[in-house]
Image (cartoon, helix red, strand yellow):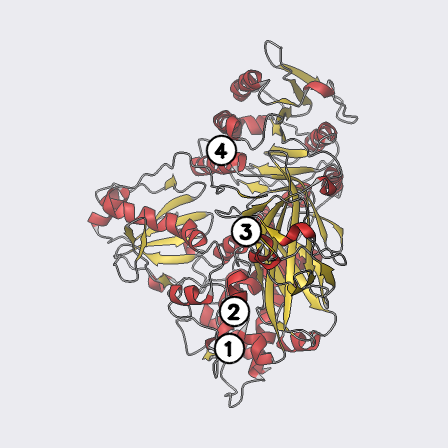
Amino acid sequence: MYITHPPTHLPSGNHQFVLYGYESYIVFMLVTLFFCLFCLLFQQYPGMNQLSSSLGGLSLQSSPQPESLRPVDLTQERNILPTTPVWAPVPNLNVDLKKLNCSPDSFRCTLTNIPQTQALLNKAKLPLGLLLHPFRDLTQLPVITSNTIVRCRSCRTYINPFVSFIDQRRWKCNLCYRVNDVPEEFMYNPLTRSYGEPHKRPEVQNSTVEFIASSDYMLRPPQPAVYLFVLDVSHNAVEAGYLTILCQSLLENLDKLPGDSRTRIGFMTFDSTIHFYNLQEGLSQPQMLIVSDIDDVFLPTPDSLLVNLYESKELIKDLLNALPSMFTNTRETHSALGPALQAAFKLMSPTGGRVSVFQTQLPSLGAGLLQSREDPNQRSSTKVVQHLGPATDFYKKLALDCSGQQTAVDLFLLSSQYSDLASLACVSKYSAGCIYYYPSFHYTHNPSQAEKLQKDLKRYLTRKIGFEAVMRIRCTKGLSMHTFHGNFFVRSTDLLSLANINPDAGFAVQLSIEENLTDTSLVCFQTALLYTSSKGERRIRVHTLCLPVVSSLADVYAGVDVQAAICLLANMAVDRSISSSLSDARDALVNAVVDSLSAYGSTVSNLQHSALVAPSSLKLFPLYVLALLKQKAFRTGTSTRLDDRVYAMCQIKCQPLVHLMKMIHPNLYRIDRLTDEGAIHVNDRVVPQPPLQKLSAEKLTREGAFLMDCGSVFYIWIGKSCDNNFIEDVLGYPNFASIPQKMVSGFYSFKFLYVCLDESPAKTEFFQHLIEDRTEAAFSYYEFLLHIQQQICK
């Protein structure tokens, strides 16, 4: 029996908005559009004809020289950035395969033409790897319930659109080439109610599918959704005021927590001691139980600390209403985070689930205590940046223990001072958790951070979640995987252990070519994510990607996906920064540009020695690398707090490509002179499509207003002489002088809008994203090109 589940939507909620008038509506539509429209329009990977019309005639069909190979003289072609968003290149497959291929929003490769040999890959000097977003929110997902999940008997690949049917009774695996029998049940297609057409089954017509798994895919009965909140209540935490926001968010979203009638929830607080809360049904009020022996932590009443959400809902609400004021007069300044986490591990071990930890300072007592390692005088150093790795292995070991018991730890760090995120982050990295960071957090002194926490919590508490998950990536015989990037524990060479999986998590993996691919014209990659849904169903989400194999260097360059390449290199650079040094990582990024452009130059005839030439497919490569070098994770010579730098590195390692690219190279648009040219229609409304502007102050005008999309935040920059009608219509103020110096608004779901005024101190944050401009510590884009050219000519 086959079923298709209804769309999975983001939580709706009230979208607060402070802009006014018709122009404000247009700006609102623009911002929300840039956030979600294109992923909705292209959720299903479009066929070639559809894509060509959508992208203005882009075509990779065979021609004397594809556009992607057009030589571009980078030093002469100064306006290199296209005026429209950069789309993933379409693999050069036949039309039928193109229609069936996996959406690049879920699965992307740095090269859409796979080199036939490792020698050819080495010659191209390009990175080979995959970028995955396996659990993203989908509006359409074929969900299959069947007694038989058809897989290759040899390599265990799931049947997919790229297998070949030798006849009605046999199919050939597209990864290991074994010939398998077609099971009798698979001969019948309930959708068409026909028999004898296995090639028309949904599993073979869709490259992304989800199976309802049988008991064969379970080591134990599916676990319930279990949520434990571990809260810092030291003086520092109480002063910061996060408890009010958290408790209010929980009260508002208790009924929206993913789960079913079995959902369980618990709470712990800690300072120099650990406080548990008995919420057992039947009590008249919550009971606090204090454990002061942090050197030998124990659970005072193991059976009443994680309770059924629905049976104990009134007690839970009572606790959430009381918590913000319970510790108001505390003088406890210490933080026993390590012992609190040890207690959380003991509490969660029988079931597994999600631990949400809120921390505001350096842990100062018990196991896992940390000392300050940051020297503020070194924040602007152009040389050595120290302490990017952990000071202790305590948090990594604890994370691995948690992972073994199907428990993930999510960290919310709300700090007013250095808190050694490099050490604390390990508890989330290795348990498949998430990391949220709010520097200088204070609910009244820093209202923008308080509002950001509120918006983040709304998404965090209500987004879908998978429990006790594993993810396996398979690839065609001859290819192999050797390094994974993301938050997980590597259980074996191709198996990742994910105690939790969420729709905002991205992963990357590096590939090598172990055996020549001379006997095949296509290769395939398949990722299978086995997880337990919040409703207690065991499910398997499968994505399959097909790419052509090529034998010429020109074809390798023609198929470069430059955004996937830069995201993979960013992940590799984070690892290099920690294992070697930040300067080594920066050198490696520059060398990636030098080596690839030098290798390409050697293939081009009649090339002037002085020219810096790239194929069109790589024309943005130097710009993106420069943007990466100016990112908080890798920049030098600019004051950067150590925790800020480490958080940026954490983000690089776990963000899906679409978010990571905007973090590296934001999109900038002028919005005060919108026209209908190139506009698109959305729900019977005309939405303007302003051209992309290059990230340079030369594009800003005193008369203009500009919108910058950085992924998680938006900025609107308002020029001093901007038209008063625009200011009044959009911001609700009569003129430039009346706009508040600091203006921020929650905008769309969990995104933020910051208004930056010309000549105001707040514009610094906006200007640091203008990566084409020179700074005291870094090249302009043109200077960077000259530097690359100089290195190539050495």
What amino acid type should be assigned to the residue bearing mark 1?
Ala
- Quarter of the picture containing the C terminus is bottom right
Q: Which residue is tagged 4?
A: 442
Measure the alpha-carbon separation of dots 2 and 1: 9 Å
Question: Which residue is identified by label 1?
Answer: 614
N-terminal of the pair, mark 2 or mark 1, is 1
Residue 621 got which mark?
Answer: 2
Q: Secondary structure at mark 2?
A: helix
Measured as percent of width and height from the top left, residue 770 is found at 42, 59
Of the numbered discs 2 and 3, the one sitting upstream in the chain is 2
Of tags 1 and 3, the one toward the viewer is 1
- How far, Cα to Cα, is label 1 from label 3? 33 Å
Dots 2 and 4: beta carbons under 8 Å?
no
Residue at 38% of width from left, 45% of height from top?
A: 754
Gap in Å between the C-alphas at discs 4 and 1? 48 Å
Nearer mark to the viewer, of 4 and 3: 4
Which of label 4 and label 1 is nearer to you? 1
Q: Is residue 388 left or right of residue 726?
A: right
Sequence-wise, the earlier of marks 4 and 3 is 4
- Residue 383 visible in the displayed image: no
Q: Residues within 10 Å of mark 3 (few under 14, many from 20)?
A: some
Residue at 50% x, 63% y is 88
The amino acid beneath tag 4 is His
Residue 129 at what x, y percent from top left?
63, 63
Local secondary structure at mark 1? strand
Q: Which residue is mark 3?
A: 640
**Can see residue 679?**
yes
Q: Please report whichever mark, 2 or 4, sits nearer to the chain's N-terminal start.
A: 4
Residue 310, quarter of the rendered image: top right
**C-beta proximity under 8 Å, tags 2 and 1:** yes
- Residue, x 50% and y 55% (percent of image)? 658
Callouts 4 and 3 close, C-beta under 8 Å: no
